[in-house]
Amino acid sequence: MTEDTHSESSNRPDVGTLVDFVYGVDEDNPLDIEVAVNEEGRVVVFHDKPFKVDLSWFEYDLGTSKLDFVLDDGEIRDAGMQIAPQISKHMQNSHQILTVLMDDKTGEPKEGKYIPLILHQK
């Protein structure tokens, strides 16, 4: 499995940080996000804290390799990470991303759902 792990200029709206809409994040308990590609070549985002608001879609910029999280109201949240080239090539062929909430204590998956992906190229 290929993966990227992270702890926390256009006419698009301002981008806030992802941790602003995640429960349970503080100095001693950071948000852990992992972007991976499964055996079938599908992109998966694993996160260990629940979101306060449902995600509406992801936006991925092919030029900058940045993945943004977009809320229902269109507000954009930056995950603060760039996607590795080996994952980026799979993003180009994706229309949705499986998003999986992991149990913070056990590391086991709790729930997952598919979120649409919009690609941008500058």
Image: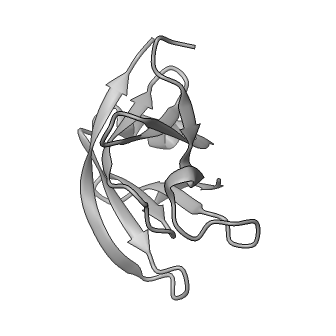
Q: How is the image coloured?
A: one colour
Q: Residue furthest bottom?
A: 106
> Between residues 115 and 94, which one lies in front from this camera angle?
115
- Describe residue 101's horizontal placement relative to residue 10 as left or right: left
Q: Residue at x 40, y 69 (%)?
A: 101
Q: Residue at x 45, y 63 (%)?
A: 46
The quarter of the image holding the N terminus is bottom left
- Describe residue 75's horizontal placement relative to residue 96 as left or right: right
Quarter location, residue 37? bottom left
- The answer, for residue 84, to whether it is visible in the render is no
Q: Residue 59: x, y in percent?
A: 38, 33
Quarter location, residue 79? top right
- The answer, for residue 56, to whether it is visible in the render is yes
Q: Residue 62: x, y in percent?
A: 45, 24
Task: Give the answer, above or below, for where 99 lies relative to 60.
Answer: below
Q: Residue 99: x, y in percent?
A: 35, 59
Q: Residue at x 44, y 67 (%)?
A: 50
The quarter of the image holding the C terminus is top left
- Describe residue 95's horizontal placement relative to residue 80 as left or right: left
Q: Residue at x 62, y 66 (%)?
A: 25
Q: Residue furthest right?
A: 27
Q: Residue 3: x, y in percent?
A: 52, 55
> Between residues 59 and 82, which one lies in front from this camera angle?
59
Task: Give the answer, above or below, for where 26 lies relative to 109.
Answer: above
Task: Give the answer, above or below, for where 122 lies relative to 56.
Answer: above
